[in-house]
Amino acid sequence: MFKNGNVTVMVSDLNRAVQFYMKTLELRLQYEVQGHWAQVQAPRLTGLHPAGEHGPQPGKSESLSIGFEVQDLVAATETLQSRGVVFSPVMEDKATRIAYFGDPDGNTLYLVEVKTQN
């Protein structure tokens, strides 16, 4: 039924956002309509998560976040910190380690490391 999908991130300065997503996060620019739209390629952007008591609530602007899975959270956060990214404290449970950060407009992004089960 669906051919493709996308997540649209509203930004205040398209050029600044393109630079952040391309240079800082190293995503690939697929195409751009100058001043109106830029599409970056990101790996597998799908996911649904139930709302929790203390987190963002459905229907609110902060209820959306974009996550990127990494193999080594420490190495990835160090790389991005060297590029000026500021992270919230790492959250950890039995299965994952997550580090939240924002893009230049404060849109919520995160890195997640899935722990291997031994």
Image (cartoon, rainbow, N blue to C red):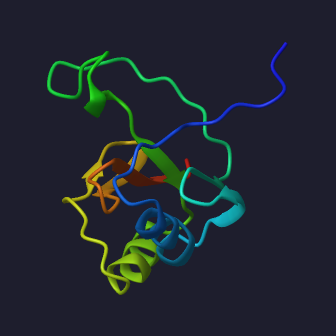
Toward the viewer: 34 or 15? 34
108 left or right of 69 in image: left
Q: Is residue 80 above or below residue 18?
A: below
117 left or right of 73 in image: right
Q: Residue at 47% across / 68% down in the picture?
A: 15
In this view, the residue farthest toward the left is 54
Quadrant into which the N terminus falls: top right
Note whether residue 95 is visible: no
Toward the viewer: 68 or 8? 8
Q: Is residue 82 above or below residue 80?
A: below
Q: Is residue 59 above or below residue 15?
A: above
- Give the percent coordinates (x, y) of residue 115: 49, 52
In this view, the residue farthest toward the bottom is 82
Note whether residue 76 is visible: yes
Q: Residue at 43% across / 23% down in the picture?
A: 49
- Give the percent coordinates (x, y) of residue 43: 67, 51
- Give the percent coordinates (x, y) of residue 31: 73, 58
95 left or right of 86 in image: right
Counting the numbered discs, the total is 0
Q: Residue at 31% across / 16% down in the picture?
A: 58
Toward the viewer: 91 or 16? 16
* Residue 69 picture quarter: bottom right
- Give the percent coordinates (x, y) of residue 54: 14, 26
Q: Residue at 38% across / 32% down in the picture?
A: 64
Toward the viewer: 57 or 4? 4
